[in-house]
């Protein structure tokens, strides 16, 4: 770390830089991260992340709950993408128990996981631009997120932390008219995306603060174990939904969005491209037809299933 700092500041007069804290009480870090910044005007000369500000004790709480009860905890690991965490958890428990989930339930899980992903990206895009000094785009992205939350509420009964995925399947079947509402969302979303691009692309405020910032090469990304959109921004088409499919993602045909010239601006463009792929995956006519199949069990087992005593424990004392 010291060597990196020396290299990054050797062309800057130390007397002309300023040391400030970004977080943990900053709107963009939400109380979970502190970054010690060295600034030369608006240019970040050096950044030292300080982690460890968030510890919720979820692991210890789970020790005294049944598998089904633990599902409500996973919602709160990331309240912006609760169903994504639900899915990871129930897949793990189903693997432990040897449970095979009916295809229709798997397709519905994919549908909601991807809708949740869109909703989460909308929050990111709106707040990302707001942190750069713009404001309008935030209101547009929140408008579309409300539509997705309405869809989640129709199926699960609540808008956030729904715990809709259950071990073995789902909590409830899809309500009448659900697919028609999804179809309306799909039809309107490209028009909304066009307005996002109008506000984002070519905006000098955004361009000056993102283009050429935080550039990485493909080799650096691999050496640093970079994943997700940041890795795909270097041109590598790596996506677990393709490479290690789960919940029947292998039944959907889609391309992985990639770009080259990875910097902060390209990362943003890759994430915007992901939303288009999401719509292609889960909101296509093929997907709606799959979800309409009635060959689905929703909950394969009722009652309480406790974790195996002494076998599943989180480390403590840290």
Image (cartoon, rainbow, N blue to C red):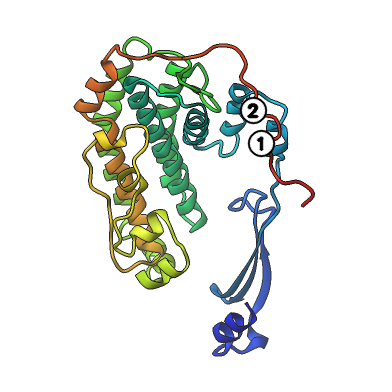
Q: Secondary structure at mark 2?
A: loop
| Residue sitting at x 37%, y 62% | 265
Q: Is residue 259 above or below residue 250?
A: below
Left or right: residue 125 compared with residue 20: left
Q: Position of residue 234 (x, y in %)?
A: 33, 65
Left or right: residue 75 compared with residue 186: right
Q: Nearer the viewer, residue 109 or 198?
A: 109
Label 2, label 1: how far apart the Cα atoms are: 8 Å
Asked whether residue 61 is in view, the answer is yes
Answer whether labels 2 and 1 touch (C-beta < 8 Å). yes
Judged from this view, the residue extending furthest toward the right is 317
Q: Within 10 Å of the Cα at label 2, are there few (<14), some (14-19), or many (20+) other Cα atoms?
A: some
Residue ID for mark 1? 311
Would you identify the image quadrant in which residue 40 lies? bottom right
| Residue sitting at x 70%, y 41% | 56
Q: Position of residue 137 (x, y in %)?
A: 41, 46
Q: Is residue 197 above or below residue 236?
A: above
Residue ID for mark 2? 307
Left or right: residue 43 compared with residue 19: left
Q: Nearer the viewer, residue 89 or 10?
A: 89
Q: Look at discs 2 and 1 and give the one toward the viewer.
A: 1
């Amino acid at each position: 770390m010291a060597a990196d700092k020396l290299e990054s500041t050797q062309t800057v007069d130390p007397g002309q830089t300023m040391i400030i804290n970004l977080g943990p009480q900053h709107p963009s870090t939400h109380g979970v991260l502190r970054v010690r910044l060295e600034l030369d005007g608006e240019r970040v000369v050096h950044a030292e992340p300080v982690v460890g500000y968030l510890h919720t004790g979820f692991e210890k709480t789970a020790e005294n709950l049944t598998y089904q009860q633990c599902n409500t905890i996973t919602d709160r690991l990331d309240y912006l993408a609760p169903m994504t965490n639900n899915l990871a958890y129930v897949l793990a428990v189903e693997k432990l128990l040897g449970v095979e989930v009916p295809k229709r339930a798997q397709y519905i899980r994919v549908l909601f996981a991807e809708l949740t992903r869109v909703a989460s990206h909308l929050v990111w895009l709106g707040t990302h631009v707001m942190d750069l000094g713009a404001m309008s785009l935030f209101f547009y992205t929140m408008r579309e997120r409300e539509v997705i939350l309405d869809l989640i509420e129709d199926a699960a009964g609540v808008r956030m932390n729904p715990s809709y995925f259950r071990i073995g399947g789902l909590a409830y079947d899809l309500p009448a008219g659900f697919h028609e509402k999804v179809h309306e969302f799909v039809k309107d979303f490209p028009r909304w995306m066009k307005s996002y691009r109008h506000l984002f692309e070519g905006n000098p405020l955004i361009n000056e603060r993102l283009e050429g910032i935080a550039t990485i090469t493909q080799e650096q990304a691999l050496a640093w174990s970079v994943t997700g959109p940041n890795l795909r921004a270097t041109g590598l088409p790596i996506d677990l939904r393709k490479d290690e499919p789960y919940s029947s993602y292998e039944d959907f045909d889609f391309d992985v969005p990639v770009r080259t010239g990875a910097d902060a601006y390209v990362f943003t463009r890759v994430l915007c491209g992901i939303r288009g792929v999401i719509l292609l995956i889960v909101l296509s006519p093929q997907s709606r037809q799959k979800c309409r199949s009635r060959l689905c069990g929703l909950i394969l087992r009722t009652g309480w299933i406790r974790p195996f005593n002494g076998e599943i424990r989180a480390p403590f004392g840290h």
